[in-house]
Amino acid sequence: MIQKHRGLIIKRKDGSEVVNYDDENFPSYIYNGYIFMGCTWERVPHYHEDIELITVYSGEMAYMVDGTYITLKKGDTLFVNSGRIHYSIATEKRVTQYIISVMHPKIICSTPAVEDKAITPIITDKSVPFVHFKSSDFDAPLIQQLMVEMEHDAKGNAFLITKYFFLIWDIIMHRFTDAYRVHVGSMAEEDNHSQKLKTMMFFIDEHYKEKITLREIAEAGGVSQTLCNQIFHKFTEKSPIDYLMHFRSRKVADLLQAGTMSMTEIADVTGFSGASYMAETFKKYFNLTPRDFKKIVTKK
């Protein structure tokens, strides 16, 4: 998801993301956002207990959810289920615009009966990592309309957000049995690999400042180096080392936005062997040198 501080993902001890809610007393994040190739908030694998909804109203983009690539066109809406590893992907050279809502299911757990019968069966069903509402589907215009209205009229209003969340959830419930389902026979292995990846991602989050090898990443997940590579490629489209380099580069972007450290100091605290290698790696992912990036983000 896009954070207020783009590219900054804060993790809990279990590796899940701490969502940057609009109000610390109400677990929802609603944002009218955009994505383009090379931005620092693109291709950042993460997961959280919250459900995520994204509706595209201009352009085209994609999402990866638990290793499945989903193309999102204008008018499409995507529901990402709780706990699924996901990230956004820019597919066009121009900017794509969308509305994103990240909301904790407890918002609509109004009673134990509602939670048991309407919420828990969906968020705990690992066979449905997402629901794709295509623009041509009969209910797609309504769910996009609700997303637009919620962003425009309800943001900052806990009561109205709850109201819209119930309406959106009703649509999700009616579509649930028609959603894409992973073959039941492969679910145990798929979920096991997802958990292994979460463990390895958290290991990288904790040790990215150090010299990390493929062997150490694999050992953190309790898998062979070969399987480690396979899991990362399936869920993130990157090798473990490429994921590590991208992670370090995003940390560089965070520090550049803060604007208080030299290039050498930033390289040292983000695990790079030197400023030159850091600059080369950073440009590979974001199409800008660290100095040019800093000029853009610090320009008033």
Image (cartoon, rainbow, N blue to C red):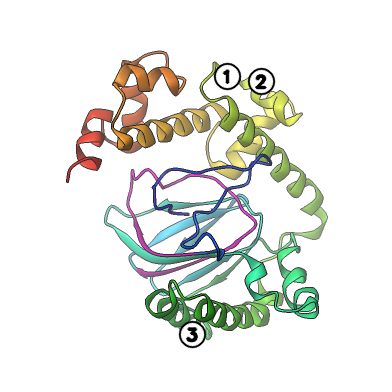
Q: Are marks 2 and 3 in contact (CB under 8 Å)?
A: no
The spot of residue 165 in percent (x, y) is: 57, 77
Q: Which residue is mark 2?
A: 216
The disc label shown at residue 212, or none: 1
Secondary structure of residue under mark 2: helix
Which stretch appears magenta?
Answer: 29-57
The one nearer the camera, 55 or 51, is 51
Q: Are marks 3 and 1 in contact (CB under 8 Å)?
A: no
Amino acid type at circle 2 is: Glu
Q: Marks 2 and 1, Cα distance to the nearest angstrom? A: 6 Å
State whether residue 220 is above or below residue 160.
Answer: above
Q: Are marks 2 and 1 in contact (CB under 8 Å)?
A: yes
Q: Which residue is mark 3?
A: 142
Total numbered labels placed on residues in the image = 3
Q: Residues within 10 Å of mark 3 (few under 14, many from 20)?
A: some
The spot of residue 295 in percent (x, y) is: 19, 36
Q: Residue furthest left?
A: 300
Amino acid type at circle 1 is: Ile
The disc label shown at residue 32, or none: none
Q: Tell me the quarter of the picture where residue 184 sits.
A: bottom right
Q: Residue at x 74, y 61 (%)?
A: 127
Q: Marks 3 and 1, Cα distance to the nearest angstrom? A: 48 Å
The spot of residue 202 in percent (x, y) is: 63, 35
Q: Residues within 10 Å of mark 1 (few under 14, many from 20)?
A: some
